[in-house]
Image: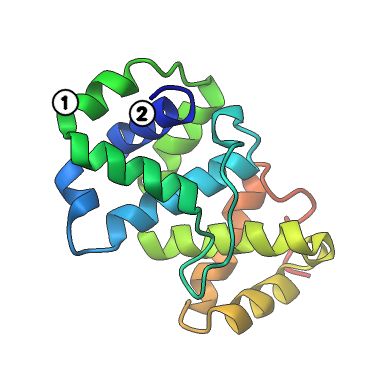
Amino acid sequence: MTGPAAAVAWLVKRLGIRAADIAGESREPRSRIQWTAYILQRAGIDAYRFFAYSMYPSYGPYSHDLAIIYYVLAGRGDGAIEELAARHTPTGREEELVDWLRGKSVEWLEAAATILMLVGENPGLARSRRRLVKEVRRVKPWLDKRLVDEAARELSEKGLLEGLGKAG
């Protein structure tokens, strides 16, 4: 198990997630992995290009293939995650983004990943932050409007949403 699995192991380790967290009842650690990996994919980080995502009822973006990898890793334990993570050589941009994203709430990650998925499906949404926020809230009404707006602004500042610096 190398390639994408090593990248996922590195991501799990860098996010500070343990095997027991992945296998546990809380969905939060798995959601954090899913949404962070999706943001990395959309940022053009090559190691995450293999994962296909869908909106998967309301938990998306979600990748079944990514889930299989992190569940296998969890079953092998923290030592195996550590060993496999050492085989991945992250890019500087990958490290920068993960360090930034690991400080974000899971709600913020959900908003950011949803924004990127919607813009990927309809690039015209990137022309107006107000319209984009409205569309995200239509798809996921439980997300706070201010949080979605903040995520869109920060994604734009990081160069992940070109042309979306204004509230328009």
Q: Residues within 10 Å of mark 2 (few under 14, many from 20)?
A: many
What is the count of numbered marks?
2
Quadrant of the image for the C terminus? bottom right
Out of 52 and 158, give the one closest to the viewer.
Answer: 52
Location of mark 1 (residue):
79
Q: Considering only vertical position in the picture, is 150 above or below 96?
A: below
| Residue type of the residue flagged with mark 1 | Gly
From where the camera sits, is residue 80 visible?
Answer: yes
Q: Position of residue 119 (x, y in %)?
A: 73, 60
Out of 108 and 113, give the one closest to the viewer.
Answer: 113
Q: Position of residue 91 (x, y in %)?
A: 53, 20
Out of 22 and 114, give the one closest to the viewer.
Answer: 22
Q: CA distance from mark 2 to mark 1?
A: 12 Å
Residue 135 got which mark? Answer: none
SS assignment at label 1: helix
| Residue type of the residue flagged with mark 2 | Trp
Q: Position of residue 81 (x, y in %)?
A: 25, 29
From where the camera sits, is residue 104 visible?
Answer: no
Q: Which residue occupies 54% across, 60% down?
A: 61
Based on the displayed image, in which of its 4 quarters is residue 108 positioned? Answer: bottom left
Q: Is residue 103 left or right of residue 23?
A: right
Q: Which residue occupies 19% across, 42% down?
A: 19
Q: Considering only vertical position in the picture, is 116 above or below 19?
A: below
SS assignment at label 2: helix
Question: Which colour scheme appears in the figure?
Answer: rainbow
Q: Nearer the viewer, mark 2 or mark 1?
A: 1
Q: Which residue occupies 48% across, 30% down?
A: 4
Location of mark 2 (residue):
10
Q: Which residue occupies 75% across, 62% down?
A: 121
Q: Considering only vertical position in the picture, is 146 above or below 159?
A: below
Q: Is residue 120 left or right of residue 143?
A: right
